[in-house]
Image: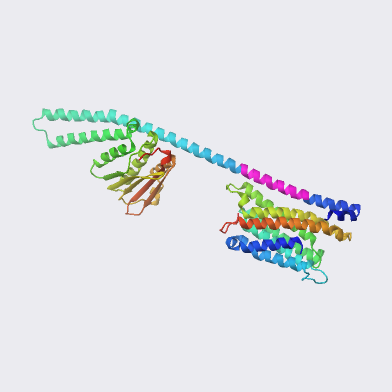
Amino acid sequence: MPPDIWIEIFAFLLCLIQFRKIKASILKWFLPFLLLTNIVEWGNYFKWYNYHHTNNWIFNIFNPIEFCFYGFLYYQTLLSKSGRNNVFYCCLFILITYLVNILFIQGFLYFDSYSYLVGCLVMVYFSYLYFVEKIKSVEQINITKTPLFWISVGLLFFYSGEFILFSFFQYFLSINDFESFLPVFHFFSAILNAILYLCISISFFYTPKQPSIS
Amino acid sequence: MYIYLLFLYTKTTQYILIGIAAGIILFLVLGAMVIYFILAYKRKQDLHKQEMLITKKEFQQQLLQSQLETQEETMSLLSKELHDNIGQLLNSTKLLIGVTQRSLESSPETLNIAEETVGKAIQEIRSLSKSMNKQWLEQFNLLENLQAEIIRINAAGIMHIKLSHSGSLLLEADKQIILFRIVQETLQNAIKHARANSIDINIVNTPGNLIITVTDNGVGMDAEAAKGMGILNIKHRAGLLGGEAVWNTEPQEGTTVSISIPIKELNYEH
């Protein structure tokens, strides 16, 4: 199994172990989310979802759910109303982009890389919103000990890297040389996944036993 | 292990793949730098806020100290005025009554009562003047000052104030005065607002703290009274000594004020 899947299994098990601690906070939703992530990734690896010789379609369903899940975290945690509104409209925009892409541009059976690129940018924007709010905040707290800080760090690294990777995804497909791209793709995907799920795992340790995670 | 694969590709593909790798590494480094700057900025911001808070607290303490000094000066002036002017006027009045009494064969009862009343007024003015005089306060310790104050109030026969304490206190003069003024203000509240007729003052030494408890049998204190200037003064003064004042009150069941002061700052001695 590729290292990405091991890292995701590790994050899920850690979430399960820490669940008693995080169950009072919004991070409790990571348990079903990480379970779903693992099911999707395992299924992709073992080719459970093959339909018309492809399993790309599962990511066209899972990725918008993933983006909306992170949007939900930020929506619940950001204090400014404008920030929360931005998160809501960005999630709506991602869903519309996916719908339009599936119906009119890249289709359902093909990996919707354009919508994914939009999602990557939006995720970077969400972490930007969080950091800006923390900089403007008057409360004196060590932000490195807040769970959303680590989630934001993970998302910033992961989706910045993914944006570059997937920018070339379509190019290599178009020149019929995707095989050349695959080693680089797998190598950086593993690194970026490791960063993201490690940051998510750290966030579980810094979750206070109360509803707020800001 | 992937690097050797690069040599199998065309030059263009090689450049693109190297570009992708460099781009991702650049983005990761940039991300790390952004996070480093955010953390550094936040730390600097927190430090600045902390310094501002300390400065603000110090300024408030200095302001309160100078307010108290001004108050003490005003009280000293009032004490001097009471003693030198009103006291002298009353003395002259008593003298004139005495002269009148001697010139009459049998002085009327009303004149005798008037002489007695003026005498009491002179005593009252003297003790009030003493309790307001800062120089006089500096000569005695808190317990003696309180005892004198209690005797003065009890002398009127309306109130019964009892003082109990363990050990003796050696406080710095300015801190003694602040504590004395706190108890004075508390007594005034109990007499004036709570309409109490019995007050117990208890001074206890606990490890690290000096606790003064003032308990009265008055009508208690409502929320409006809790916002009064007297209460704020007590809180400010206790805060100036690094301590706090806590009120425990029930309607018609009296009030207990607990003033707790850390004694490490007060040179306390058993």
Q: Is residue B101 magenta?
A: no
Is residue B25 something that shows in the picture? yes
Quadrant housing the C terminus of chain B? top left
Taking A5 as reference, is B211 above or below it? above
Start-end of magenta stretch: B25-44
Most foreground residue, A68 or B27:
B27
Is residue A166 something that shows in the picture? no
Give the farthest residue toward the front.
Answer: B1
Taking B199 as reference, is A197 above or below it? below
Q: Residue B32: percent from the left, percent from the top?
A: 71, 48
Q: Residue B228: percent from the left, percent from the top?
A: 40, 45
Query: Tag count in the figure?
Result: 0
Image-quadrant location for residue A101: bottom right
Dominant secondary structure of the magenta stretch? helix
Give the farthest residue toward the right.
Answer: B10
Query: Which residue sits at x=43%, y=35%?
Result: B65
Taking B67 as reference, is B25 above or below it? below
Q: Residue B100: percent from the left, percent from the top?
A: 14, 29
Taking A49 as reference, is B38 above or below it? above
Most foreground residue, A94 or A52:
A52
Answer with left or right where residue A142 lies relative to residue B181. Answer: right
Query: Which residue sits at x=62%, y=63%?
Result: A17
Most foreground residue, A178 or B120:
A178
Quadrant housing the N terminus of chain B? bottom right
Q: Residue B169: percent from the left, percent from the top?
A: 35, 38
Q: Is residue B26 magenta?
A: yes
Give the farthest residue toward the left.
Answer: B105
Answer with left or right where residue B5 lies relative to residue B109. Answer: right
Protein image colouring:
rainbow
